[in-house]
Image (cartoon, helix red, strand yellow):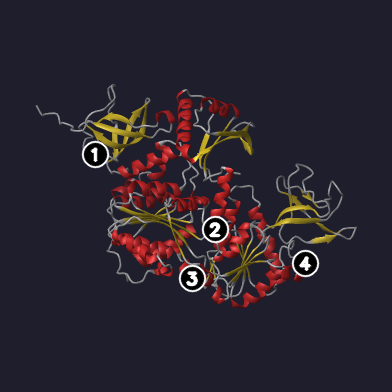
Amino acid sequence: MPETPIVTLPVARVAVDVSLPHLDRPFDYRVGPAEDEAAVPGARVRVRFAGRLRDGFVLERLAASDSERELSPLSRVTSSEPVVTPEIARLVRAVADHYAGCFADVLRLAVPPRHAATEKAEPAQRPPLPELDLADAGAWGEYATGPALLEALRRGDRPRAYWQVVPAHHRSGDWADGFAAAARATADGGRGSVLVVPDQRDLARLRAACNRVLGRTGFVELTAEAGPAARYRAFLAALRGDVRVVIGNRAAAYAPVRDLGLVAVWDDGDDLLAEQRAPYPHTRTVLALRATQQQCAFLAAGYGRSCEAEQWVQRGWLRELAADRTQTRHTAARVRAAVDSDLALARDPAARSARLPHEVFELVRATLPQGPVLFQVPRSGYLVALVCQDCREPARCRRCHGPLRQQQRQQRQRGADGRAAAVDLGCVWCGLLHPDWSCPICESRSLRAPVVGADRTAEELGRAFPNTVIRQSSGSQVLPEVPGTPALVVATPGAEPTAEGGYAGAVLLDTQLLLLRVDLRASEEALRRWLAVVALVRPGADGGSVIAAGDSAARAVQALVRLDPAGFAARELAERAEAHFPPAAKVVTVDGAAGTLAEVVQLLRAPEPTEVLGPVPLPGASLAGTEDPVERLTLRTPLSTGSALVRALKDVTAVRSAKKNEGAQRVRVDPVVLG
C-alpha cells in the first residue's frame, strides 16, 4: 500500500478577494498533497469562503495554524506563478492601512489579472544594456550635485531627493533624460528601478529617453491602458527578473522589480497620480512607503513643486537638488506679466481689464517671425458663458432655464435698436433655439462673454493676425507636436503640443480663471500648468519670451515671473499650516447619506484633538436611484494623531460592515480635491 505523501507546511495563509472591512485579514486553509508543490507563496488559488468559491493569493506557508477551527482545504491552485512577493504584500498592507482601505482593494491595483497564454509563453530574449559613456551625465550635468547623485546610485546608496527641474526647452529641463540616466546608473549598480509618470504624453517622452539610454529591450512599460496581455507580460518580465527597469503610470508603482534600488515620480502634483478607485491612494505616497520599506532611493521631480514635496524637503526627508538662480534665468525663457509697471499701464490704460493687452500683440509680432507662438487658454469651447451686456444677468433658456451658448463663427445681426444681437442662440440642456432672445431683467438684446473658450480665441487671433497659420489642441483633438515654422498655437492646459526647436514665445491668457477655481490647490495647480508652458519655450538667451495676461499682483503670477516654485510652495505650506489644511494636517472626508454619516459620528472614537466639520450637502450629487443628496463629513486632526484617526475610522467601517448596516460610505484620506 503506497504511503500518503507528507506535507511539511500544511497550512496556507491566504488573502481572499473580499472587500469587507471587518474581514480585512488573511485566512488559513489546509494544503493537501495534490496542491503542495504548486501552492507556493504568491500563487493564485481558489478557496471556499462564506459558502462561495473566491479567488485568493497565498501569502505564506505555515507548519501550523493559530485557528482552533478545522481548516477548509484549498479548492485548487489557479496558477503557481508567485505573483505576490513578500515585499509587495507588505507594501499593499501599508497602503491599505494608510488610506483606511482593504488589502484586497489595493491588491487589485498591484497585481494585474492573469493572462494564461502570456504566462505560459517563453520569455523574450533580452541582450545586455548598450555601452554608455559614464562621463556624460546628460541632464544631470547641468546641476552642481547631479553627477554625485548618479554616482551614489551606482554605488548602491539610497539618496532621497527632490529635483527642481529648470522649466526650459534646454538640456537642463530634460527630465526624461535625467530619469533614464538615473535608472541606468541604478542598473549599473545591479539594482532595479520604477519610474512613474502621470499620463501617456509623459510616458512617450520617457520611453524615447529610455530607448537611448537603456536600449529597446532594457525596460518594460506597465500601464493599465496597455491591454491584459501586454500588461501581464510586462508584469512577469519584472517579476522574473528579466528586466531591471519598469516605466509607466500609477499602475507601475507596485511593479515587482527585483533588488529595487530606485523609485521615481515625475510631476507629483498632477491629479492623474491619484487613484480613482478605493481606497484612492496617491502614487507619491505609495512610492514613499515603498522606498521606506525596501530601503531604496527616492526621486521626485517637477517644474513646479507640490506642498507635499515641500513639506518633505523642510522635514529633511528629501534633499533639494536645484540649479542656481543665475543658471535658471539664463536657460529659461524670459517671463513677465502684461501689466507689471506704471509705465505699461500708462501706455495701455485698459490693460488691467483687457483680455488681450497691447503688450501681448507686441510679443506676438516680435516672436512670430522666429517660430510658433503658443496661447494657453484655460477653457475649451467657443463662448463658454453668455451674460447680458448691460446688467450681467446670465443668459438662460425660457423653457428649462439652462445656459445658452452661441455656436462657433456665428454671425451677428443688428437689432431694431441698432445694437448687436446674437442670433440662433441654443440651450445647452434642451437644445431650444432663441433667435429673439432678450434679457428678462433689463430687456437688453446685447450679450457679452465673460468666459471665452479656445475656439473663440483662435477665431479672434485669426482676425488679428491674418495670413497666419492657426493650430488648435484641446479635448479629444490633441496635437502631439507642431513644426517650428511661424504659427499661432491655441491650446488648453495639458494639451499643449511640443514644438520643433521650442516655441519662440507663449501667452498665458485668462490667468484669473485658474486662480479663482473653488479649490484649495487652485494656485498651486495654476503655477504648475504655467511652468509647463514655460518649459516648452526657447531659452531667454535665444529670444524666448512668455507673458501672463491677468492680475500681475497675484502671488502665483509673481512666483511665475521669478521662476520660484520652491518659494511659492513654502509660503503656501505655511498658510495651510495656519489654517490646518493638508498636508499640514490630516484630513479625512466621508461621503454618504445623512443617516449614514450620523451613525459614523456616533461610532467614531476619534483621538483628541479632532475637528468634526459638517456634514454638508455636495452640490449636484445624489444617491444612486434616489434624489436624496450626498453629504460630506470632514474630519481634521494634527499630523501627530493622524494615524490614530485613520485607524478609528477604519474601526467604524468594520463595525458597520459586520452589522450589515445599510448605507454605503466613501472614505478618502488626504483627498486631492478639497473644495
The residue that mark 3 highlights is 170
Q: Is residue 584 left or right of residue 77?
A: right
Query: In the image, residue 453 lies at what x, y percent?
Result: 67, 58
What is the number of the mark on residue 349? 4
Mark nearer the viewer, 1 or 4 = 4
From this viewpoint, is residue 1 visible? yes
Q: Which amino acid does the dot numbered 2 rest on?
A: Gly
Q: Which amino acid does the dot numbered 4 rest on?
A: Pro
What is the number of the mark on residue 567? 2
Q: Earlier in the sequence, mark 2 or mark 1?
A: 1
Query: On the image, which quarter does residue 320 sit in?
Result: bottom left
Establish if 532 lies above or below 58: below
User: Circle 2 sits in a helix, a strand or a loop, which is it?
Assistant: helix
Q: For the N terminus, give its image quadrant.
A: top left
User: Circle 1 sits in a helix, a strand or a loop, which is it?
Assistant: loop
In the picture as drawn, the residue positioned furthest to the bottom comes out as 369
Q: CA distance from mark 2 to mark 1?
A: 56 Å
Q: CA distance from mark 1 to mark 4?
A: 79 Å
Which residue is more in the foreground, 260 or 368? 260
